[in-house]
Image: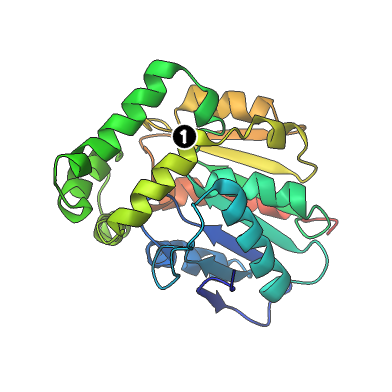
């Protein structure tokens, strides 16, 4: 598989923060968070997961393992030297990130998992079926994701979430290709991420949104408890897209964590 499409900012910085988007969207919706990280002195790389944005959907079935392998190639290609690399994975990206940290522990200095159910394939059956039905049923009924996404994304926003970053998320997520989305949801549900959590060696921060119906705060806190030395933070008022809904609160947790985690890198 070729290196997926990606963008690089702040080429002269010492530490690189990689941004992995979720099952909806592309690298485009990270733009406000990219600016925050650049202002804090980091080099930033945001990729389009295979099948998203400008990256082609692979011929092989989409799996979290395949995506992690692709991402490892990207880190090897454009990452900073040694372990001066941070992976921030949101939602589906938060499934990929821990596996990458397992596959290349010498290249990952810190890990951030945002709004993720790490072992969806092995969670409660009813939760799994509801997760599938809510996302795929509209497509099975003949709707295009462009038409179905706005209502789905609105349910994943906090009650008072608004602003330019939220509007950007809504616009970009609606552009997710239907075929890619089906493949991604299947990959998410079939994946068991629990074994990867216990093997993580890098400092890890798990960030939840108070009102997130997907990466619920109780699930995210339990996720952090399964990671050696894992830290947990909940963004009040936010839901699934905390970094866009309440960026000041999100970064008030993220940036000090990175400073602590990377102190000896």
The answer to which of 159 and 179 lies nearer the viewer is 179
- Give x and y (percent) for residue 4: 54, 70
Is residue 107 visible in the rendered image? The answer is: yes
In terms of depth relative to the viewer, which is nearer, 190 or 250? 190
Density class for disc 1 (Cα within 10 Å; few <14, some 14-19, many ≥20) is many
The residue sitting at the front extreme is: 59
Q: Residue at x 48, y 63 (%)?
A: 58
> Which residue is identified by label 1?
189
Q: Quadrant of the N terminus?
A: bottom right
Left or right of residue 211: residue 171: left
Expressed as whole percent of the image width and height from the top left, the position of residue 138 reads: 19, 40
Residue shown at the point (17%, 52%) measured from the top left: 144
| Image mark count | 1
Give percent across and percent down for residue 205: 64, 41
Residue shown at 48%/43% (left/top)? Answer: 187
Whether 93 is drawn above or below 37: the answer is above
**For this rendering, which residue is in front, 91 or 42?**
91
Q: Residue at x 48, y 46 (%)?
A: 92
The C terminus, quarter of image: bottom right
Disc 1 secondary structure class: helix
Image coordinates for residue 111, horizontal then vertical, percent? 67, 48
Horizontal relation, residue 43 to residue 145: left or right: right
Left/right of residue 18 with respect to residue 188 in the rendered view: right
Toward the bottom, the furthest residue is 12
Looking at the image, residue 220 lies above or below residue 142: above
* Residue 245 in view here: no
User: Quadrant of residue 132 in the image?
Assistant: top left
Q: Is residue 241 left or right of residue 13?
A: left
Quarter of the image for residue 53 reads bottom left
């Amino acid at each position: 598989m070729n290196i997926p499409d990606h963008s690089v900012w702040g080429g002269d910085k010492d530490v690189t923060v990689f941004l992995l988007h979720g099952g909806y969207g592309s690298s485009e919706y990270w733009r406000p968070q990219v600016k925050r990280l650049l202002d804090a002195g980091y080099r930033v790389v945001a990729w389009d997961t295979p099948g998203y944005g400008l990256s082609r959907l692979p011929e092989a079935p989409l799996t979290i393992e395949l995506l992690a392998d692709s991402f490892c190639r990207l880190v090897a290609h454009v990452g900073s030297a040694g372990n001066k690399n941070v992976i921030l994975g949101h939602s589906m990206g938060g499934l990929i990130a821990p596996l990458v940290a397992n596959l290349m522990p010498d290249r990952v200095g810190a890990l951030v998992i945002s709004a993720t159910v790490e072992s969806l394939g092995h969670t409660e059956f009813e939760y799994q079926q509801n997760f599938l039905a809510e996302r795929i049923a509209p497509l099975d009924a003949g709707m295009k994701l462009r038409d179905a996404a706005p209502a789905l994304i609105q349910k994943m926003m906090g009650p008072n979430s608004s602003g330019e970053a939220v509007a950007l998320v809504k616009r970009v997520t609606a552009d997710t290709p239907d075929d890619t989305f089906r493949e991604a949801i299947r990959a998410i549900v079939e994946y068991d991420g629990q074994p990867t959590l216990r093997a993580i060696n890098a400092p890890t921060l798990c960030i939840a949104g108070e009102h997130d119906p997907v990466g619920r705060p109780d699930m995210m806190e339990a996720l952090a408890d399964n990671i050696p030395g894992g830290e947990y933070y909940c963004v009040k008022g936010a839901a699934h897209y905390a970094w866009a809904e309440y960026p000041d609160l999100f970064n008030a947790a993220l940036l000090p964590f990175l400073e602590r985690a990377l102190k000896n890198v």
